[in-house]
Image: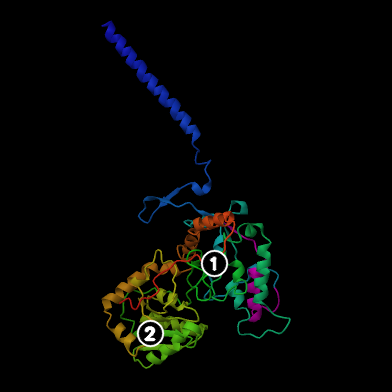
Amino acid sequence: MARKSSLLKRAAIAVVSVIAIYVILNASVSRSLPSSSDLPRQLIREEEDDDQGRRAPVQPKVRVYMYNLPKRFTYGVIEQHSIARGGVKKPVDDVTALKYPGHQHMHEWYLFSDLNRPEVDRSGSPIVRVLDPADADLFYVPVFSSLSLIVNAGRPVEPGSGYSDEKMQEGLMEWLEGQEWWRRNGGRDHVIPAGDPNALYRILDRVKNAVLLVADFGRLRPDQGSFVKDVVIPYSHRVNLFNGEIGVEARNTLLFFMGNRYRKDGGKVRDLLFQVLEKEGDVTIKHGTQSRENRRAATKGMHTSKFCLNPAGDTPSACRLFDSIVSLCVPVIVSDSIELPFEDVIDYRKFSIFVEANAALQPRFLVQMLRKIKTKKILEYQREMRLVTRYFDYDNPNGAVKEIWRQVSQKLPLIKLMGNRDRRLVLRNLTEPNCSCLCTNQTGLITSI
């Protein structure tokens, strides 16, 4: 009996010893690990409800510092645009009270406005604005480069007077090169809006390291722009959203187009398409430039047509594509070199028809192809468009602005990689530009039908 009691006593001592060792080791390891308050903010994973109300992990937010640019690069451009059109007769005391004018490159205004909102109003955004540049991952340059380009568009300016977009660009470059954060990485971690294909044309070679927000790459050399470092953004749609029901009963026109018939470069296909299509009875194809009256006519035409023609303009992309999507008018895209926004999450083949230019110019090819498409298929296209409309709506809180920031935030790992790589390279003997770009199928897609 005494022997049994002794064994039990030793067993109890052993168990207590093991527990004590575990407690000591656990406390030691816990002290050696950082708490969430000790971790950098970008490493802390948060959780939020998904569309089904489930708790789901989200990626850490990228920290963005927006430069406080001199007003001549932001509100001052709005003022000059208004003066050139007679909206105001002379410089105003408070330029921040001026309204940004509506046009197809309004992304720069929406992004600027978004970063000026309180963080509490930016729920779900993949980025967070920081007020100390030392805390920033990326730097946003809120220049109104596209609006600046059209201040004096088509209007004669007397020598020595008027507004100069070229001077604005040179002034912006001088200002940026005076910033230590720009000089640190040669602008590689900066984000600059250049939506209009001609925006910042004078200084492109000096800002090409930055993440450029562009509508397409039609005017950029391979060493100036690429999928790898830049972001393709949607034009602002200029027609009203279609809020009616999915269906074709009220869409009596087979194919609709209204826009400038005569364009340069790849846009020359427009005049040829006019010649092929203008005599077709169920096709509406009209020449028209930007105006309030023409926008109303385009809205009505797109809302009452089954298909909308989207040929190339001076560059491969045009705002008409996004007008047709928000109109639930199936896009027929005749632009062999077009690049599209948000293709990592959007499959355009589900609601668009892509036709190679040479095929589209064959007499009766396009209309015969479209007439064969059944109503059931058109309804499928319309349902898919309704699912993605928000991506192209800058007024939607879960729309274009948030998606642009999402794509911008995905550039951060590459920016860090390239910055570190550039700093450690000693000598590079290159006979050709070192272009960071992705190679894709160069043969083109003949048709998506």
Q: Residue at x 65, y 75 (%)?
A: 166
Position of 416 compared to 384: left or right?
Answer: right
Q: Where are the magenta residues, as a range?
A: 64-91
Asked whether, in this view, residue 174 is left or right of residue 312, the answer is: right
Q: Position of residue 348 (x, y in %)?
A: 37, 71
Residue 144: horizontal and vertical position, in percent? 60, 70
**Residue at the spot of label 2:** 358
Q: Dot 1: within a 10 Å radius of its alpha carbon, few (fewer than 14), some, or many (20 or more) residues?
A: many
**Where is 410 relative to 390, above or below?**
above
Residue at the bottom extreme of this rendering: 279
Instruction: Please name the colour scheme applied to the rendered image.
Output: rainbow
Q: Quadrant of residue 302?
A: bottom left
* Residue 4 image-quadrant placement: top left
Residue 137 visible somewhere in the drawing: no
Report the front residue among 241 and 153. 153
Q: Which residue is mark 1?
A: 212
